[in-house]
Image (cartoon, grey):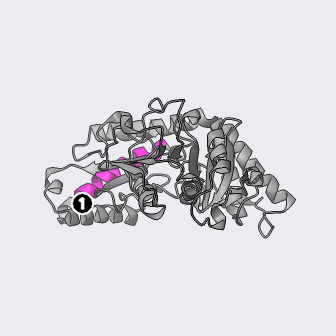
Amino acid sequence: MKPRERPDNPRFSSGPCAKRPGWSLEKLEGALLGRSHRSKEARAKLRQALQETRDILSLPDDYRLAITPASDTGAMEMALWSLLGERGADVLDWDSFASDWAHDVTRELGIKDSRVFKTPYGEIPDLSRADFSRDLIFLWNGTTSGVRAPDGDWIPDEREGLVFCDATSALFAQEIPWRALDVITFSWQKVLGGEAAHGMIALSPGAARRLESFRPPRPMPKIFRMAKDGKIHEGFFEGEVINTPSLLCLEDYLDALRWAREAGGLSALIRRANGNLAAIAAWVEKTDWIDFLCPDPAYRSNTSVCLSIVAEDFLKRSEEERRAFVKRLAARLEEENAALDIGGYRKAPPGIRIWAGATVERASLEALFPWLEWAYRETAKEGV
């Protein structure tokens, strides 16, 4: 039978992600539309966004924080182009975005002394292979693989190289050991459900020293320039953005930060995401045709949850047929307005991806599960 109750919010996209509970356009009435981002009022809001982000995440006082163009991708590109090349670099690759950073390191930036440790989707490289006399590039949480780092214990306090971490689908939902990381990038559009196009970058004191002492042997596009003539552009870390931001998106991010604070801060956000993962795990445990793409619970994401269809009949199909099956399953859910944007990432193994970050209500997930079971059965009947 087709389920009768639909999720209150059918939006399960892994980016941009679901808006916070209770969100509405009316919450953005204070946006400084038509104003210059250099105006006194706009600068105050940009500084407010930086300070409230620092406060909620407990970013160390000696770490710099700035708003960047082009979402997390722009923030990470800015970091790689500005800081890599002083020494060799290692890349831990367990996700399509990590593969992008590996491509940048080896091909676009041409770091000759580079190593890439790659594993299939659902697995994580041997973390002990990282050499901390070199720079290290990795992502904390695999948005397209559902695999996350277990902790920061494998990163030594004393290290010669810098540790670059793409943390966009982890921050605000997972504990991040700041002192283990030197360059941290993320965006507004993930765990807090902000709108797209704006990223953030945090730099440790060690990364700041590199920024001033190292001159990259490459042309530096304007939107990547965090330093000039061997000096950090301090204004950039005080709300003087490099290019024009959307003040509507800024207002939306401030609203999300306000909600996060009122919800109980970082610990409450982590509890919400962990509770959502627990609900999914309980459903998977009792459902014989589905399983986690990541087999080890210690490495499973609590935000971008990637699932594999493991039914024997499904696995006998060709990859093209499996992808067509998942596409039809997702389309059926969308037609019913039961789940939107739930298909796995296009480069990942064919499967389902459910965003379970802090803005998602557990009740919506629990209402989703019967719809997934119905859509699977109906799609299987069609022989797609």
Measured as percent of width and height from the top left, residue 161 is found at 52, 41
In the rendered image of this protein, does residue 185 appear above or below residue 34?
Answer: above
Q: Which amino acid does the dot numbered 1 rest on?
A: Glu
In the rendered image of this protein, does residue 297 appear above or below residue 118?
Answer: above
Q: Quadrant of the N terminus?
A: bottom left
Measured as percent of width and height from the top left, residue 178 is found at 58, 36
Tell whether position 376 is magenta: yes
Q: Mark 1 sits on what residue?
A: 378
Please indicate, yes or no, whether residue 83 appears anywhere in the rendered image.
yes
Q: Is residue 37 left or right of residue 100?
A: right
Q: Residue at x 34, y 35 (%)?
A: 297
Question: Which residues lie in the magenta part?
Answer: 362-378
Measured as percent of width and height from the top left, residue 261 is found at 67, 39
Label 1: which secondary element: helix
For the stretch drawn in magenta, the main secondary structure is helix
Please indicate, yes or no, whether residue 339 appears anywhere in the rendered image.
no
Q: Residue at x 62, y 46 (%)?
A: 210
Considering every residue shown, the one lying at the far bottom of the view is 34
In the rendered image of this protein, does residue 319 appear above or below residue 59?
Answer: below
Q: Is residue 99 left or right of residue 210?
A: left
Measured as percent of width and height from the top left, residue 139 is found at 46, 47
